[in-house]
Image (cartoon, helix red, strand yellow):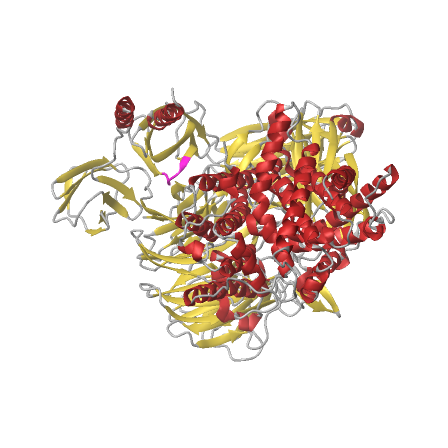
Amino acid sequence: MTRYKRILLIVLVIVAAGGYVFFRGSQEIAAQVEFTGQGADILLNLPQEVATVTVTNEAGRLLSVITVGPGARQKIPVFIKWEPDKQYAFELALRDGRGVRLTGRTPADELEKVSFVLQAPYGLSRTDSTGVVPAGSAFTANILLTSHTDQPVNVLLDLVIPPGVEVLSVPQGMQAEQRGGVQHIVGRRRLAAINEHWNEQIVLKAAQEGLEPVIQAVANIDNGREQWQMTGHAAVKVATVADIARNIRVQAVEVPVDVTGRSDPKARSGSLVYAPASRLSSLAGGKGEHARLDDEPFTYAGIQLSNDGDDHVLALVTVKIIDPASGALAPVFVSPAHKNAGLGYSYGVVDLAPHAFSQVILPVYLNENSAFGGRYKLQAEASVFGADQVISGADKEIQLITRNDRPVIITLFMAMTALLGIGWLIWRQEAALARFTSKELVIISLFGTVTFVAVNLPETVLWDMARAVLGPFSFLVTGFFNQTVLYALLVALVVVLPHPGAVTLMIIVRFILNGFILGHFTPVQILTCAVLALCLEVALYAAGVTRKREAGPDTVGKVALLAVACGLVDVVTTYMNFMAYMTLYRLFYAHWYINAVLAAGFLYTAGGAAIGCRLGSTLRRTALD
Amino acid sequence: MLNWQELTQSETAGTGIHRLDPRVKITMLIITGGLIVFLDNPVLLAILLAVGAAGMLIARLTLIKLKVVCVVVLLGLWGTVFSQALFYEQVPRTVMGTLISPGTPVLGPLTKGVYIYREGMLHGLRQGLRMATMTTLGLLVCWTTDSRLLLLGLVRMRLPYSLAFMTVTAVRFIPVLLRETMQVVTSAKMRGGSRLSMQLLSPILANCLRRAGTLAVAVESRAFRAQDRRTYLEELDLSLREKLFLTGYLLAAAAVVTCKTSYFCYQYGLYYVSALRPVYEFTRVYL
Amino acid sequence: MKNLYKSIVIFSLLVIMVAGGGCGRKSMAGMQGIFTKNGLVMINVSHQPQEVAMKVNGQSKIPNWHFDGGSVFVREFWQPGASYEVQVDGRNWAGTAPMKPTPLPVSAQELGMLEDTPAVKDWSPVVYEDVAVSADGRYIGVASFDHNVYVFDNTGKKLWEYRIPDGVGVAAAFAADGSKLFVGESSPDANIYAFDTLTGKIRWQYGMAADIGRSTAQKWNSRPKITNIVVMGDKVITSAEYTQRVTERDGGRAKVTYVTSCVIRAFDGNDGNPKWRYPETGVMDTGISRITCSADGGKIAFANHSWSRGQFYVDGSIRLLAGSTGKLIGLCQLTPKGGKFSYVGIFDGINISPNGQYLTIVTSDDRGMLFDVSSIKADTADGEPNRDFRLLWLRQISNIQQVGGVPVYAYGNTARTTDEGKVYFMTGTTFLADKTATSGAPPFSHPDATSFFAYSNRGELLWKWQSEGGLGKLRFSRDSRYVVIPIQHNYVTRQKDKSGVYCLDLARTDGDPLVWFYPLEGVAVAAGIAGDGTTVVGLEVPIRQVDDRPDGMHRLHILQ
């Protein structure tokens, strides 16, 4: 089969497969109905575009027709009043013309006229969960009675406090009583309107660990025609802080993270960098209103908690950033007065499911008027919600780096260098170039070409692929071309032509080629080339290569010296490059990341320079006459 | 097999683009290089890319060159868009698709899910289109301009003659060097050596040095740098159409820069005028 | 080559066959009857009918009908459970009336792309846009967060759109006769525009930044912005506020996080001539709540609010202005509840009855109040404002639950009162004491979250209705009979199943005020209802799920 036919066959197979998938029709729809207090929820197996839902009762009476907005959905709530132990039919008309019919039978029991929930400790996401409280700590029991009838009901509530549990506060309108040595809290309330509720919180304290007290409540209800009783109970496990702490742990604290809890791999953990939004703007006298001087969080802290126990624990998680010297909240990180209830630190509540991990992401605010750099300590603490004892905590050292003018100063220096260099070249153009013979100019030009072919072209192709695969660590791959090969060629040139200005000319030629052929005319490249030329000329002169104009380094020591000099040049120029990106593109890099790039660059460059020495010596011997 | 010589030589097809004054082409390249730094709208960047591509078609470049441009441009675009789409970390971000869901064994928990973000794709598209546009235009200029005229153009634009000569020499010898590199690589392969060894540079550079001597003799025998003031066989003359075209392009670029500068001043609270709000809006949306 | 061509032809035929087989979809056609709250609507009627006949439970009845946009509207108070037969030009339809009305979706119009959208795990709707419906329900105006102003007619046809240059629309209101649409923006200039409803031409505009200060901040919330547009006859009252984030204070640079300047202006709605300004000179140093006015425009009420107390216009002060002059005629100062609540926080929770007799307030900390302000006259002479706000009753409509020292509450959001002193309140979603924290949701909902309360004029709770989710901008019909409530996602449970537009009939006394619920794919951020209660609209925005996947679109839904 020829190549064309092979390609055509592949295309036909792909089109056929795509056509089958597209036109084969939709999957079977399955649905079920769950009856709720407000009506029913229709649950579909797959998201579908439903147009209408028609509800009829057992007698065929049309109860409701619900039209649904465009868009696919899997769950559709239906608000209807249903009667117990009756069959209801739901007809779903889909937008593609299909229909689904399902029926459901309502629970046999009548909907409660009054619902009663007793929960302790208060706040678990499921009211039927058992919660754990620390011994000796206060916790809250929550009572919620809701009337579902439009007839007024009178409720007499009697809360039985088991032995071992102390009542710390009684809600207004209720009173504490002692009956047969058992403490009761009683109260009366009239619920006159439908959906009106009686909601109280009672603060209790369980002194002894190991107990599993059961708080009971009895509600006597009278609606004028009938009376009935409802009971509720809430079991609480009382454990020592140590027991709870055994199961509940602050596993890790990560800062900075973004609002979704992800950390930037380039950013150093615990390192917070703060700089005004634009140095240029403040230099030019701008008002600075565009700055992030608002009440949004500066960054976030992600706190990971684990619960190895068998019970739910509702935890209150706090994040405080303190000054290690004073132990007090660091003024720079105190949250605005109207945030966090004026506490000055962030907090969040999380329901820790048994045998599970949870992450709480809390905001970290920055007071820009008192932003001083330095080391601080972030304290993350977890306590049982409703109790007042800390059960687990973790600290993290953080460092605030502020008002760093270094990137701006370095960028300005680079710009000055570039301007002066270009100006000098324009002013002294021919005189500067007259120092080179024609042959030398051609050699430099050809070296520039080789550099372009051996460094720039592969880098252009490799750069994006390396970034896609290795992300921020792509420098490990591109460093081979960017540094090793480049410096090998630069050093080889300067060994062949030990003249001051040779490498500068080569850098200029390479820059022009890069700009003309690949179009890489960016401000950062101009700055980088300028400082590279300057630093390299200085380093080569200091190392004696262009000063003595000898026949290249011929001893191991001289090669090592040259390699180190070039390595240092690369470190300096790469560092300046980072500063330029930070200033012009407002990028931030962690110190460790910068250090890693510099270290790798040093090694790559030194290696390349050493290779270049050898290469240059060989060329002097064999090709130069 | 790729014909590197054909690929790296300029053509003499005689189209309007070939006949365009090299100064116009160089100036357009420089202006466009500066302009795309200011532009953020992917559509506008794509239009510039399309202009470059159209120029290549009008210049009737050979099929091999067009194919190479397509491959280089598409590869670069793909790489940039894909990498940005996956690793976009700013918020807000919108998921368009899932590559690795968090539930996937091994990779899921390791990566916490890999998604394709719309904002990342747009960001990558911007970066990729900038690079692609300049690559296309740069190659178009190189492939449609004789090196002799390129040199003349650079000199007439006040670049030092020697530097211009060096640049043109470099451009002129790219195809030669590429050919030689392929020969060296082939011979290394045939000897069983590595294709990526640094030792391959030695014969390439040695050839360059030998060639340099010959070339230097050749140019000096033609009074290269004999006098300070040099005369030229050909003179470049901008036609009225070229002047108008260049002026128009300059004005358009200046307008873009002005709009962007005014928007910058507005954004940073340096200077704001109510009457310029349509300009700010235009800049924000279209530039 | 011949074989190749044959293969291509055969393959193409195969694809067409498969496609044709898969394409056999049933299409909905035929006239249908929908029982809406406005009457029976026959849809899919292609042209103006000649004759419409109707039978109710077998008995003939002469219907009162009109034709509009492909539908026949029968203004008939239909009986639940009754059987109806309708004949339109010989086409028949029969059906039984359901127990409750159905919302009739007239149109769902896609609007522009939004730069940011809410996330299911955050409480904030992020998108703050507004929609208005003309009094007769014929026109709908959208001040959209996508930088555009749109006007549609009630069939969904777009009449025009206008791009606000470098600003977003945040407030919209129609003139009383529907001839003009007033739109307020958030921009460096804080313009209020008066557009011709039919043509979109700008009749006049005024930049409130001249009063409150200009800003080039990029975030819409940090810019000067229009916060209220209220139409009073031929006058339009508007307020604008600005938070100057960086100020000079005590010789140093200070960061400010609360409103620093706010002003109210009244204009002639026809030509934009300024009528009066409050305060006459200077600005208020705090923000204000919504502005409410009596039906005759004689009294205007609003409250000052601020996270900090404010120096001159203290948080919690309720002010009554004379509608004709803008002079302060009444002043009442509320104090914070205390504890973790250091501010009163009245935002949307203020309303004056149409007859100007009653004023109702609900604070953020859920204190609901009804005042009798009948003794405060609009023609009060200059001088000390009348402080005779007779408090009729105060109720803690929802408990603040103190749990482990942390207050948990469902903030008081909306208040409405009628001429008889009947009061309605609505609470929003659950908050821990820091209501603007982005620290995540509590794991449980307050029992009174997203609840609608009805109180008698004596302060007795009549009924309560509850949904779940965050609250958008809700609107009442002119006679306070209907209220349309846009509900967003529930950030506590991270669910959005109950997001959509709800219509309640406040005249119902059986404790079940829900007329209908219209679910949306995204979340509803604003809703509107015509003054006469006919046309209802809802603004939908997409929401990002936990994995950043978006659900929904930016749409305007027009319903009957």
Percent x, y of residue C182: 41, 65
Quick check: B5 above or below A90? below
Closer to the camera in the image, B83 or A194 = B83
Queried whether the magenta region covers residue A508, the answer comes back as no
Quick check: A390 above or below A577? above
Q: Is residue A624 left or right of residue C125?
A: right
Percent x, y of residue A377: 80, 44
Q: Residue at x 32, y 25 (%)?
A: A58
Quick check: A54 above or below A500? above
Closer to the camera in the image, A504 or C448 = A504
Q: What is the chief secondary structure element of the magenta stretch?
A: loop
Percent x, y of residue A41: 43, 31
Q: Quadrant of the C terminus of chain A?
A: top right
Closer to the camera in the image, B136 or A242 = B136
Report the residue that reaches farthest toward the front.
B221
Q: Tell me which segment is drawn in magenta.
A: A68-72
In the rendered image, is residue A262 in sight? no
Q: Quadrant of the N terminus of chain A?
A: top left
Queried whether the magenta region covers residue A69, the answer comes back as yes
